[in-house]
Structure formats: C-alpha cells, structure tokens
Amino acid sequence: MRTSLLWALIISLSQPALSWAEHLHLVTGDGYAPFTGQTLPGGGILSQVVQAALRQRQVSSELDWRPWNRGLLMTLNGAYDATFPYVRSVELDKDYHYSEPLLVVRQHIFSRADEEYEVDDLPALAGKKLCYPLGWQLPVAIQGMVEQGLLTRHAPVGLNECARLLLLKRDDFFIANGPLGEVALSFTERSSAEFRRSQSAFAETSLHVLVPRRHPHAHRVLQRFNEGLALLREGNEYQRLLGRYLQQRDEQAGR
C-alpha cells in the first residue's frame, strides 16, 4: 500500500515537469509584418519559425494574440510560457531569458521623400515626432533622445499605423527593419516615391523568444527551443520556410 502511494506521489509530482515539454502556451503581438500578424500567412514568418522549431523537438504549441505590452506582462506573470519576437534590452534582461536569434535585422529611418534623415546625423531629428509601436524597443541612441525630451514619441499598436500617420504628416518619421518598413508603407497604397528610407542604418539587432526567469522550467524550455531552431537551420528547413512564406504572401496579395 505504501509502495503504491509512493509511486502515485512520484507520478503526480512529475506531471508539471512533463507538461511544459509536451505543450507550450505562446503569445505574440499584431501588426509586426512580416514577422507577426493575425492576417499574415501562418501568423507571420516568425510565428511559423517559432512553432516549427518547437515541432522539431516534438513540442506542440498554442499561440495567442495580445497587445504587445499586455502579452509581455502576462508572460512574466505566468499566463504564457514564452513570448516573441523581442530585441535585447537592459529592461528585459532583468526578467527574461533570451533564445538564440530568430532573425538578425538592421533598422532604418523612414520619412516622407521631402525630408531626409540619416542614422549618422541623429541631431537633425531633434524636435521631430517619432512613431514607434507600443511595446517595441527603441535603438539606444533614440531612446536617449526621447528621455531627454529631444523627440516626441507616438506609440500606436502597430507599424502600419505609423506609415499612415507619416503620410498624414502627423508624425515625421518611424524606425523599422528595411523589409518591415517597406511592407508597412505598401499598405498605404501610395507610391514608394513619396517615402524615403535612410541609406545608413542602426547597428544590427536580433529578435528572440523570451522566457521569464521565474518560469519553473525556463532553462529546459530554452534548451528545447534552441535545439529545434538549430535543427531547423541545419536541415535547410529554415530557408524553405522563408521561401514558402514569401510564396504564401504573394498568393494572399493576389486574391
């Protein structure tokens, strides 16, 4: 009888440790095309990459959509196992572990064609209005300018809104990864000649999955994910995934 009770106790205690490996509850935000977006094929290219990497290690996942800040806080408070995609920052370092990079990006300044701004001349931005979505991490130099009151930041829920506000002249510029900014501008359905992308760019940044440091299995979750991501790349599945996404996006645009 005691032996049976002992085994029952061992099994019951082992269940929480097993559950994380079988299924993860993920959250991301909308309006971050082409990386994440509810209307994008598969929820965006990085939504596809993250879930495909987990499948490589036989981990199923469920993806929810929340406003960026809310999803981040809900992950920290244990409602979700992980969130993505995020850039490294001092603020996030305190509460989260980072996965291996999902993607390395270079951010540019996007403005109207008649206003030229360059990353190597940031003082020229003083007094201007910046649009940068809520929950996104600004480049360090730009964050410093905002904190000093040299820039006014408007923070809508997504980058597409920044492109629209730029067109309406309510904001002067936004900052985004090259392809990401181009996609946002395309949604305005205006000629690309009306906009300008800076020739210079901020230092390369990488996008990651975040797992809270307080998660009871944080290191094991990250290990499983990183192993899956490595397998995805080693077998060229990562590149095939990117190719399929671009094809799906073209088909979606042609409907």
Image (cartoon, helix red, strand yellow):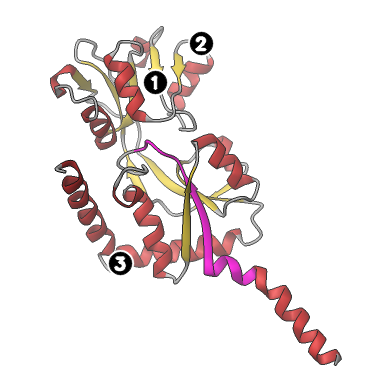
Secondary structure, mark 1, is strand
Please give the residue where the numbered disc 3 appears in the rendered image: 234
**Spatial CA span between label 2 and label 1:** 15 Å
- 10 Å crowding of disc 2: few (<14), some (14-19), many (20+): few
Q: Relative to the observer, which residue lies in front, 234 or 255?
A: 255
The amino acid on which the numbered mark 1 sits, given as a three-letter code, is Cys
| Residue 204, disc | none
Q: Quadrant of the N terminus?
A: bottom right
The amino acid on which the numbered mark 3 sits, given as a three-letter code, is Glu
Magenta stretch bounds: 17-32
Please give the residue where the numbered disc 2 appears in the rendered image: 149
N-terminal of the pair, mark 1 or mark 3, is: 1
Secondary structure, mark 2, is loop
User: Where does the image place residue 113, in percent across and percent down from the top left?
Assistant: 19, 15
* Residue ID at (44%, 70%): 57
* Residue ID at (38%, 10%): 128
User: Where does the image place residue 167, in percent across and percent down from the top left?
Assistant: 26, 16
Tell me where residue 190 sits by quadrant: top left
The amino acid on which the numbered mark 2 sits, given as a three-letter code, is Gly
**Spatial CA span between label 3 and label 2:** 46 Å
Verify whether residue 28 appears in magenta. yes
Determine whether 248 is above or below 143 in the image: below
Tell me where residue 31 sits by quadrant: top left
Residue 121 visible in the shown view = no
Kindly indicate whether the residue at mark 3 contacts the one at mark 1 (C-beta within 8 angstroms).
Answer: no
Number of numbered labels in the structure image: 3
N-terminal of the pair, mark 2 or mark 1, is: 1
Verify whether residue 150 appears in magenta. no
Residue 242 relative to residue 224: left or right? left
- 10 Å crowding of disc 3: few (<14), some (14-19), many (20+): few
Please give the residue where the numbered disc 1 appears in the rendered image: 131
